[in-house]
Image (cartoon, rainbow, N blue to C red):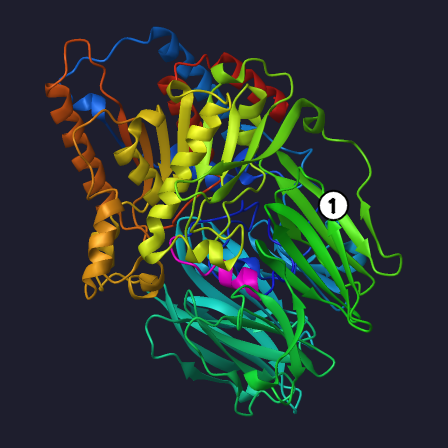
């Protein structure tokens, strides 16, 4: 779900390594670490993930490229019990997979990136970058600007688009499904559009115009997942391309953000805990940049602009949570920052949007969503509590200064439009057909008491008419790293599971960001075990309150969430029956000691430095999943990995899997006859992307695994999939 400028916080959010993809792609899809979430685009009406669309890209990958799977059944000397009924139901899942690959979806609109500029809308149509007049955007009357096939890439798609201020040029970043590598093309707009230039490995990019009305493109260059260089380029008769800035500290990364009024281009230099921002004058881009505030360890700040004032979101001062400050644009240093607005405790700032007379903050307070509308003329604040079912924001196009549109969604409910109208001072909800899920399901907000007494929030979904929840299957979700929220965007397969009687539980453990910066600080470095204790407490609380039981409980995570899941499998395997992991980070110690890996230095603030700090090394040894494998009864585990994943190296996942198999085999030798060993499946997918969230092949494989391992009848889930997809 790509949209308008997800401001600086979202730009930061998707630059976090090992985060994985956090929202579905549609046709522009998963977040691509930095500006994938920070484009100004329009969303079409309905939101159906690409896994349910007839898109040749995914279908051909799923049908034509074989994956490699390894199973514990292949080598264990213990004979597995026959589960004939479950085997028979495998055919149903193959039918579902075939339907997902071939079913046309004419009744749904696929979401593409659409950038409005002047009187045109720029977007991708088929394999082309096109534009059409705004009033004709929903018709087939468009002008082809560039054919992506000219790049000779395998199934390319447009990741984001930027249009030069005077519409002489348009730049677009092109990627492929199976790689994080990208190419930025610059097309000259004329009667016969032509590609003027192309730049490899571009991360973020923005246009400004100089005093002589010349368009200048600033862009960041990424090498081995590290983004340290900023370039600027001009085109036409005065063509040039020069390096503008290089960050020398390898633990920092760089991205660009253009303030909403286009007055300043900001160079943001950051690591996980510290930031530094330089301003480039949008009217004089050849002038030297101006430093706002030199980096101070532990101080984060991000900048917007309005009417010659800088609005700065920062954690400086006490408490060390985000607060909004402002200063004159010509006096940007920290000693001039004036406190403007303070967040409540346990508040996460999701995003900020600036309007002519208002500043809108999108917040999560005590795990519930709010919108705060601040009047900039009188400093008034209007706080709006949003519907309790809502779990996530999707920022929408907001070119209209009178309105602030956005969408709300949950894991089982598609996005719904809302608009705050400044003149009326009211929030308006999209009218029309009410989603039946509102009546057939429940959302609960509960808390678990962790080992140290800390209250850990949970979000639970289940069918309204479910009886005896203790006998229902439970799928627990966890992440708990980098200060990032557990992703709770809409996923159709989650809705299908709820329809089939599953309970879904989302555990917002420490290390994540759901309750603000301190929530993250309390779960990183030498406090990582807090997240493990939180997860254990959540599952025990769920069971204690009558939500399922260990034999029907599964746990799922992706990327860095694999650390807590793997640690729990070592420490309390009896709480679970099955686990699904995707691109999991499982060998923390060896990875963080290998400085040749592209992300190790950037990760030191999260995991610690075991190479030089014995305290960090010994602490990591206490929870690292790979280091703590031992002979015992583990839950069955399904791992999806990606062959050329640069963020979580495949080698570490294979080593973990092999060591786990050895421990299971050793444990089996000491057990009596009739012992049924857990199943361990490693499914290695081709490609170099980190997580392909909307791969229908992966989704059906995971669902099939869960139904088999929990001993469930899959007939009803197949019927629910058919009903939902309207086969």
Q: Quadrant of residue 725?
A: top right
Instruction: Report helix, strand or loop for mark 1.
Output: strand
Q: Is residue 653 above or below residue 137?
A: above
- Direction from residue 357 to residue 175 in the image, left or right: left
Q: Between 507 and 154, which is closer to the camera in this rendering?
A: 507
- Direction from residue 89 to residue 195 in the image, left or right: right
Q: Residues within 10 Å of mark 1 (few under 14, many from 20)?
A: some
**Residue 583 visible in rendering:** no
Q: Quadrant of residue 82?
A: top left
Q: Residue 26: image x %, image y %?
A: 57, 45
- Direction from residue 323 to residue 645 in the image, left or right: left
Q: Between 500 and 700, which is closer to the camera in this rendering?
A: 500
Q: Is residue 381 above or below residue 156?
A: below
Q: Is residue 432 above or below residue 406?
A: above
- Seen as rendered, the residue at the extreme front is 453
Q: Residue 141: image x %, image y %?
A: 74, 53
Quadrant that contains the C terminus: top right
Q: Residue 147: image x %, image y %?
A: 55, 58
Q: Quadrant of residue 598?
A: bottom left
Q: Is residue 438 above or below residue 195?
A: above
Q: Residue 716: image x %, image y %?
A: 53, 14
Q: Residue visible at 41% across and 24% down?
A: 553
Q: Which span is picked out in magenta?
A: 8-18
- Residue 625 included in the magenta stretch of the image: no
- Seen as rendered, the residue at the extreme right is 424
Q: Residue visible at 42% across and 72% down?
A: 221
Q: Residue visible at 68% across and 70% down?
A: 191
**Which residue in the protein does label 1 denote?**
417
**Residue 642 visible in rendering:** yes
Q: Between 703 and 159, which is closer to the camera in this rendering?
A: 703
């Amino acid at each position: 779900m790509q949209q308008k400028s997800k401001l600086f916080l979202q730009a930061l959010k998707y630059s976090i390594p090992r985060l994985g993809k956090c929202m579905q792609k549609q046709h522009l899809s998963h977040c691509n670490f930095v500006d994938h979430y920070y484009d100004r685009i329009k969303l079409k009406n309905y939101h159906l993930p690409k896994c349910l669309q007839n898109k040749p890209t995914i279908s051909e990958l799923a049908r034509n490229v074989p994956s490699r799977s390894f199973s514990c059944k292949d080598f264990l000397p213990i004979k597995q019990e026959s589960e004939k009924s479950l085997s028979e139901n495998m055919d149903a899942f193959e039918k579902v997979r075939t339907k997902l690959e071939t079913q046309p979806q004419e009744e749904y609109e696929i979401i593409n990136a659409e950038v409005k500029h002047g009187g045109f809308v720029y977007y991708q149509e088929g394999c082309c970058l096109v534009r059409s007049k705004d009033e004709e955007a929903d018709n087939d009357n468009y002008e082809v600007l560039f054919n992506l096939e000219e790049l000779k890439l395998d199934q390319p798609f447009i990741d984001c688009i930027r249009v030069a201020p005077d519409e002489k040029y348009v730049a677009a970043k092109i990627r492929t499904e199976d790689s994080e590598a990208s190419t930025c093309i610059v097309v000259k707009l004329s009667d016969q559009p032509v590609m003027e230039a192309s730049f490899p490995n571009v991360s973020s990019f923005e246009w400004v115009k100089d005093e002589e009305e010349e368009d200048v493109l600033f862009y960041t260059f990424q090498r081995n997942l590290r983004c340290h260089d900023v370039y600027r380029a001009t085109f036409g008769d005065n063509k040039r391309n020069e390096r503008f800035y290089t960050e020398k500290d390898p633990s920092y990364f760089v991205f660009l953000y253009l303030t909403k009024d286009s007055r300043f281009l900001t160079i943001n230099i950051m690591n996980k805990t510290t930031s530094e921002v330089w301003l480039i004058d949008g009217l004089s881009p050849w002038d030297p940049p101006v430093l706002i505030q030199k980096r101070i360890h532990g101080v984060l700040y991000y900048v917007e602009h309005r009417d010659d004032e800088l609005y700065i979101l920062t954690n400086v001062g006490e408490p060390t949570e985000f607060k909004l400050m402002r200063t004159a644009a010509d006096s940007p240093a920290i000693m001039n920052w004036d406190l403007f607005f303070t967040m409540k405790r346990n508040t996460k700032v999701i995003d900020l949007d600036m309007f002519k007379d208002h500043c809108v903050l999108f917040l999560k307070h005590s795990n519930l969503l709010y919108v705060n509308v601040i009047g900039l003329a009188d400093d008034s604040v209007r706080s709006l509590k949003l519907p309790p079912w809502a779990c996530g924001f999707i920022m929408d196009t907001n070119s209209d200064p009178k309105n602030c549109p956005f969408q709300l969604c949950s894991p089982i409910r598609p996005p719904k439009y809302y608009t705050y109208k400044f003149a009326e001072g009211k929030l308006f909800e999209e009218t029309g057909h009410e989603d039946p899920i509102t009546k057939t399901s429940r959302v609960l907000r509960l808390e678990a008491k962790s080992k140290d007494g800390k209250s850990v929030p949970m979000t639970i979904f289940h069918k309204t008419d479910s009886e005896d929840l203790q006998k229902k299957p439970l799928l627990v979700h966890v992440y708990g790293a980098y200060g990032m929220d557990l992703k709770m965007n809409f996923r159709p397969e989650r809705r299908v599971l709820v329809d089939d009687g599953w309970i879904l539980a989302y555990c917002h453990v420490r290390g994540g960001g759901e309750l603000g910066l301190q929530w993250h600080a309390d779960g990183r470095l030498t406090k990582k075990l807090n997240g493990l204790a939180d997860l254990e407490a959540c599952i025990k609380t769920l069971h204690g309150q009558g939500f399922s039981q260990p034999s029907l409980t599964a746990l799922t995570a992706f990327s860095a969430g694999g650390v807590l899941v793997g640690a729990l499998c070592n420490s309390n395997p009896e709480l679970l029956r099955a686990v699904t992991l995707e691109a999991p980070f499982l060998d923390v110690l060896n990875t963080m000691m290998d400085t040749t890996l592209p992300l190790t230095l950037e990760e030191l603030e999260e995991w610690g430095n075991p190479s030089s700090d014995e305290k960090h090394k010994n602490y990591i040894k206490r929870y690292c999943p790979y280091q703590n494998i031992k002979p015992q009864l583990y839950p069955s585990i399904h791992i999806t990995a990606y062959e050329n994943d640069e963020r979580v190296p495949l080698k570490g996942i294979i080593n973990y899997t092999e060591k786990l198999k050895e421990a299971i085999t050793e444990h089996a030798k000491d057990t009596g006859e009739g012992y049924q060993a857990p199943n361990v499946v490693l499914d290695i997918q081709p490609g170099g992307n980190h997580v392909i969230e909307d791969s229908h092949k992966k989704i059906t494989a995971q669902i099939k695994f869960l139904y088999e391992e929990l001993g469930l009848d899959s007939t009803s889930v197949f019927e629910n999939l058919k009903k939902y997809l309207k086969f």
